[in-house]
Amino acid sequence: MKDKIIKEYRKLFYADSVAVIGATSAFTKLGFYAMYSMLNYNGKVFLVNPHFTELEGRKVYPSINDVPENVDLAVIVVPAKLVPGVLRECAQKGVKGASIITALFKEIGAEGEKLQKEMASIANEAGIKIIGPNTLGFANVHRGLNASFNPLFGGLKKGNIAVFCQSGGISSILGNMALDENIGISKIASLGNRVNVGFSEILEYLLYDDETDVIAIHIEGLHNARSFMEIAKKVVKKKPVVAYKVGRTDVNKAAFSHTGSLAGDYKLYNAMFKQAGVMSVDNPIELLDAAKALAFQPAPAGNRVAVLSQQAGAGLVLSDVCTMNGLIVSPFTDETNKKFEELLPPYTIRTNPVDLAFAPLPRGRAEASRIALEDKNIDALIYFQLWFPMMDFPSEELIEFSKEYEKPVVVVLNGPKNSYDEDISKLEKGRIPVYPNPERGAKALARLAQYGQIRKRFSEE
């Protein structure tokens, strides 16, 4: 099964040769940006448009059948009524993957739905896997393949998080966030109208994708909820799946026309996610925050957390958010309490949550981390520090202690822009995720603990 699925998607995600059909010099058209995204690809790139003979110093072919070599993947950006004919030509050429950016199919009603069904018939008969139509496209970051009309996807850092969205706009938001925060991505896509590659199919593929360890998805609606649940239950035993579901309000009934799928009842989706072991989040930021924590750190053995904060107010916020998201700010053992009493001055808070205040030197802050992680009542640690002149952060020690005690650590560093760049780089190279505010950090840690519980539950079934 694994070999069969990997083979079916190979020429989509790992194409050796790509044809951009609808490439153009007009920067007001998506074909221009789709072409631009592909120009630096290290595979073979062919441009196709009957109205040009040359673009960007490259030969342009009238049709894909005029391309003198084999083509694995077609990026299609032509008017909707022309897409079925172009897809037939792709089938004749032996193309096995397509990124169909063109819109105006199922999402506009009966006429568009008829075109989409014709397209599905052609693709399924020829064995062509399609991302789209009505899509931004996709990128395989490890391969350097950007089959989208968003050139910025070409600058994403290689990583182990796969991001698959229904909406092109949301995939761009998440891509921009990944760029801003240096988060590594394996593959990113908007699935659009989902002709024959929907969420069920992509989850099944990603289960076997060696470059992906964490899966983040944005969903408006599903074609087949039962199939999704069955596949998700298999996937979460090996890889965490985090979902952001929109269409929660009556206002968002527009989701029906957006990508041609009814949004559905949010409570039903939430119940389905819970049953299938899929973690649900409330917004795109939480989606990538959770994925980052899951990509960096192992799930803790339990949900008991130590809160260390260099500022009491932030420690209280961390404690509240942790507790509201299923974590327990656990009391320390008597032995640990005694160690904190000896380490910290009496004006600090020396029980969990710990207020380190400004007094302890870097050695003291590092030792506080060790003491907390040593405690048998603690499964994970979250550490907050507010930027202050001349106050160092124990980055190397935290990395060392997290590995030594085999307990996940999440760090929150808050300060002016760029003030913590060196520490963030050091920590994240050491696989400790860093967040800019207490709420984001605490919720990310909660997802780590939640996945530990999910994996335990499914391993027992």
Image (cartoon, helix red, strand yellow):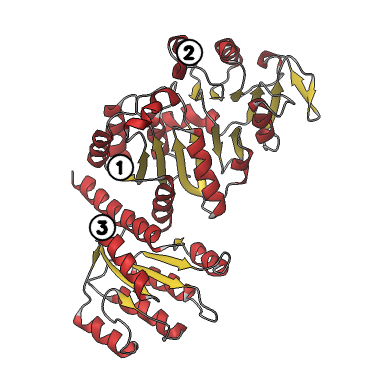
Q: Earlier in the sequence, mark 1 or mark 3?
A: 1
- Indicate which label's residue lies in the foreground, 1 or 2: 2
Residue 274: x %, y % from top left: 24, 42
Query: Which secondary structure lies at badge 2?
Result: helix
Q: Earlier in the sequence, mark 1 or mark 2?
A: 2
- Indicate which label's residue lies in the foreground, 1 or 3: 3
* Residue identified by numbered label 3: 324
Q: Which mark is residue 278?
A: 1
Q: Please rate how many residues cluster around mark 2, counting C-alpha atoms within 10 Å: few if below 14, some from 14 to 19, many from 20.
A: some
What amino acid type is highlighted by mark number 3?
Met
- Residue at the image position 62 percent from the left and 31 percent from the top: 16
User: Are the residues tagged 1 and 2 within 8 Å (C-beta)?
Assistant: no
Residue 35: x %, y % from top left: 68, 30
* Residue identified by numbered label 2: 112
* Quadrant location of the C terminus in the rendered image: top left
Residue sitting nearer the eye, 359 or 89? 359
Q: CA distance from mark 1 to mark 3?
A: 19 Å
* Quadrant location of the N terminus in the rendered image: top left
